[in-house]
Image (cartoon, grey):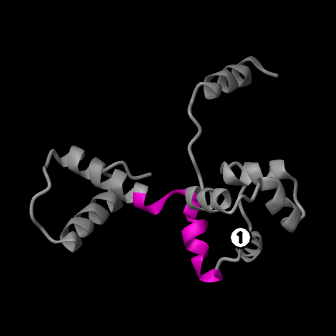
C-alpha cells in the first residue's frame, strides 16, 4: 500500500460515517430484518448489503424493488426508502435553508414557503448556499 493511500485511510478512520438510507435502516430495525436476510433475498452477501447501505456501492433499481417486495413495502415508496445518493431529503432541505440563512446573514422573516424555496433554488443554481 502506498504511503499516501495509507495516510488517507488513517484519516478516514477518525471520521464519523455518514448515515445513508436512514429510513430503510429504521424499517429494517423495526422489522428485525438483518442485512444477511436482505442479502439472501437478493442473492448477495450481508457485506454487499452493508456496502450498499453505507453508500459505497450503488443500488440497482431492480435491487431496490426486490428489497421493497421482500419487506412488504409498496413499490411507490422507492424514493422514500432509496433517495438520491441515500441522502435524507428532509435533512438536506434543513441544511440548505441553514446555509442560505448563514450565507445571506438573514433571520427568518415572515414570507411564503414558496418565496423562500425559489430564493434558495436560485441561489443554488448560481453555485451559492453550499450547493455541490
Question: Is residue 61 shown in magenta?
Answer: no
Answer with the quarter of the image where residue 72 lies.
bottom right
- Residue at image mark 1: 64
Give the residue drawn at x 80%, y 62%. 38
Q: Position of residue 67 (x, y in %)?
A: 74, 70
Does 4 appear above or below 57? above
Question: Is residue 87 shown in magenta?
Answer: yes
Q: Position of residue 45 (x, y in %)?
A: 87, 53
Indicate left or right for 49 with 22 as reference: right
Total marks in image:
1
Give the residue drawn at x 82%, y 47%. 47
Q: Give the magenta-colored segment's residue range.
A: 74-90
Answer with the quarter of the image where residue 49 lies.
bottom right
Q: In this orientation, which residue lies closer to the viewer: 108 or 9?
A: 108
Q: In this orientation, which residue lies closer to the viewer: 33 or 7?
A: 33
Indicate left or right for 100 with 1 as reference: left
Q: In this orientation, which residue lies closer to the viewer: 38 or 59?
A: 38
Q: Is residue 127 something one can see in this rendering?
A: no
From the image, which quarter does the N terminus lie in?
top right
> Are there few (<14), some (14-19), or many (20+) residues within 10 Å of tag 1?
some
Give the residue drawn at x 58%, y 77%. 77
Give the residue drawn at x 31%, y 51%. 128
Amino acid at each position: 500500500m502506498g504511503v499516501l493511500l495509507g495516510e488517507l485511510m488513517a484519516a478516514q478512520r477518525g471520521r464519523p460515517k455518514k448515515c445513508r438510507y436512514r429510513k430503510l435502516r429504521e424499517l429494517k430495525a423495526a422489522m428485525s430484518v438483518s442485512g444477511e436476510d436482505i442479502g439472501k433475498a437478493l442473492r448477495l452477501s450481508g457485506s454487499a448489503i452493508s456496502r450498499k447501505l453505507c453508500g459505497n456501492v450503488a443500488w440497482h433499481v431492480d435491487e431496490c424493488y426486490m428489497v421493497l417486495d421482500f419487506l412488504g413495502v409498496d413499490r411507490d415508496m422507492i424514493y422514500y426508502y432509496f433517495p438520491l445518493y441515500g441522502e435524507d431529503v428532509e435533512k438536506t432541505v434543513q441544511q440548505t435553508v441553514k446555509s442560505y440563512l448563514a450565507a445571506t446573514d438573514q433571520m427568518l422573516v415572515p414570507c411564503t414557503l414558496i418565496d423562500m424555496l425559489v430564493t434558495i433554488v436560485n441561489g443554488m443554481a448560481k453555485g451559492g448556499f453550499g450547493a455541490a
